[in-house]
Amino acid sequence: MAQAERQRKWYAGGLHFECQKCGNCCSGPAEGYIWVTGTEIERIADYLQMPVEEVRSKYLRRVRLRISIIEHESTKDCVFLRTSDGHKTCMIYPVRPAQCRSWPFWRENLTDQQAWERARRKCPGINGGRIYSPGEIQHIREGG
């Protein structure tokens, strides 16, 4: 049995998720990478009404051969995460990168039930809301 099939087997009945827009998936304390493609950078620039080069210099960093959104140095929160009136919001939510759109259906969260439960501790939307079938989860993971 292929590894992907083994991984999907534990959630053959689907998984519940509904984004609570809490910003926890965009927050530290650990440093990470928020990978963006050239097309995503262009969408972000259009949305922010800024030249692409300004977006690149202000919000992005090169990590080897890839580009990542920078994080606040002290909190490790995504630079696009804003707190207002006690609520966290993404200032580019409508054009957020595929990596952000695919949360919580990341490979590391889907390896087994324990990994899903670890992600749930950070994300109040996991195990609530609508149910996603294994096919829908795969489609989301593939950038759909």
Image: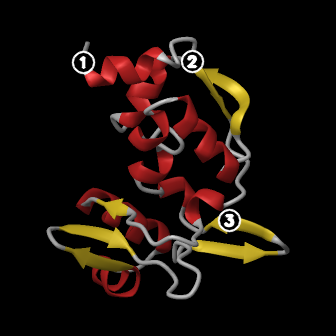
Disc 1 from disc 2: Cα separation? 19 Å
Q: Is residue 144 visible?
A: no
Residue 71 in the figure: left or right of residue 69: right
Question: As drawn, which residue projects farthest toward the right?
Answer: 85
Q: Is residue 126 visible?
A: yes
Counting other residues with Cα less than 10 Å from the Cα at mark 2, is it few (<14), some (14-19), or many (20 or more)? some
Q: Where is residue 66 shown, x and y percent of the image?
A: 21, 66
Query: Taking 137 as reference, is 64 above or below it?
Result: below
Disc 1 from disc 3: Cα separation? 38 Å
Query: Taking 122 as reference, is 114 above or below it?
Result: above
Q: Dividing the image into 4 quarters, which one contains the C terminus?
A: top left
The kind of residue tagged 2 is Gly
Residue 116 in the figure: left or right of residue 137: right
Q: Which mark is residue 89?
A: 3
Residue at which label 2 appears: 14
Q: Dividing the image into 4 quarters, which one contains the N terminus?
A: top left
The kind of residue tagged 3 is Thr
What residue is at 31 percent from the left and 24 percent from the top? 4
Residue 36 placement: quadrant: bottom left
Q: Where is residue 35 shown, x and y percent of the image?
A: 33, 61
Disc 3 from disc 2: Cα separation? 28 Å
Task: Tell me the SS state at disc 3.
Answer: strand
Task: Tell me the SS state at disc 1.
Answer: loop
Residue at which label 1 appears: 2
Question: As drawn, which residue projects farthest toward the left?
Answer: 65
Q: Where is residue 29 shown, x and y percent of the image?
A: 58, 72
